[in-house]
Image (cartoon, grey):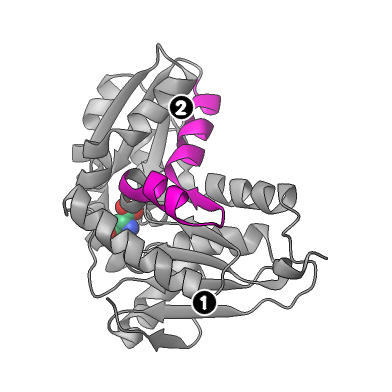
Amino acid sequence: MNPCASRAIGIFDSGVGGLTVHHRVAERLPSESIIYFGDTARVPYGTKSAETVVRYARACAHMLVRRDIKLLVVACNTASAYALDILRAELDIPVVGVVEPGAKRAAMSTRNGRIGVIGTKGTIRSGQYQSAILSYIPDAHVFAKACPLFVPLAEEGWIEGPVPEQIAVEYLQEFLENDIDTLVLGCTHYPLLKTVIGKVAGDSVALVDSAQATSEIVARQLESLNLQCAEGPPSYQFLVTDAPDSFAAVGSLFLGGQVGEVEWVAFE
Ligand code: DGL
């Protein structure tokens, strides 16, 4: 085994939402150790300027690099949209974002070339999903909408019933009028609302989970670089910049299981 292979994968997000990516990576690569960093003191990223998101993303990435990770996953869609190229240029380890894998899967899934993208205000404003999809299907019709209320709903665990359903109807109506057949869940929190979103969108619309698509890319990158860890059991570390207890409490919903011990770290 490559001696670097036993090092952990680093995953960062603005907060708790990236645990949906952790969940998918751990499911796909059960022998890999993961260090997860949630920037809970500075969440949300989705409402902030590009410059601020880049500054925060660089701080998160460098913090994980100091912990000697072998590959970095930018789980936050907003940070992926604004900072991925900068992090790739700056770091000497592979860096995987969530936008490109989600966009590619959407392009592969659509039959009528009419694709919806939902995400934070920042992600949608960046246009990154839209341009990545168009790079695969130049004549695609991409409809994009920010759905900020899905984030607090997911964090409150309000993921079923009339309230999230009504909000989903408001957000998704215009996509349905535009006859989309594929909808990209371009935010860490949205997989929790998959059932409600799927119910409102209907069976004819395929939902693309960027977190799931990303885990596949991480697996392929590790394989091509001969960096897979063959020996378990994996270790999982959770680091946050604020309120470890509430991270652990809310996190189990996103992780799909108990979050272990959570360590507070100072942010720069
Ligand atoms: N993690 C963010 C994203 O996927 C959502 C929460 C936030 O706005 O920070 O874009």
* Relative side of 242 to 102, left or right: left
- For the residue marked with disc 2, what is the amino acid? Ser
* Relative side of 255 to 40, left or right: right
Over which residues does the magenta segment extend?
Answer: 82-110
Does the image show residue 160? no
Q: Which residue occupies the extreme right position in the image?
A: 1
Secondary structure under badge 2?
loop
Location of residue 169 in the rendering, given as x and y in whole percent from the top left corner: 23, 39
Residue 254 vs residue 169, the one in the foreground: 254
Residue 190 vs residue 196, the one in the foreground: 190
What residue is drawn where x is 42% and y is 26%? 133
Q: Main secondary structure of the magenta part?
A: helix
What residue is drawn where x is 45% and y is 34%? 103
What residue is drawn where x is 40% and y is 57%? 192
- Residue 93 included in the magenta stretch of the image: yes
* Residue pointed to by mark 1: 67
The label number, if any, that marks residue 204 in the structure image: 2
Image quadrant assignment for residue 117? top left
In the displayed structure, 179 sits above or below 205; it is above
Secondary structure under badge 1?
loop
In the displayed structure, 199 sits above or below 26; it is above
Location of residue 135 in the rendering, given as x and y in whole percent from the top left corner: 44, 22
Looking at the rendered image, the quarter that the C terminus falls into is bottom left
* Relative side of 257 to 41, left or right: right
For label 1, count other residues whose C-alpha is less than 10 Å away and answer few (under 14), some (14-19) or many (20+).
Answer: few
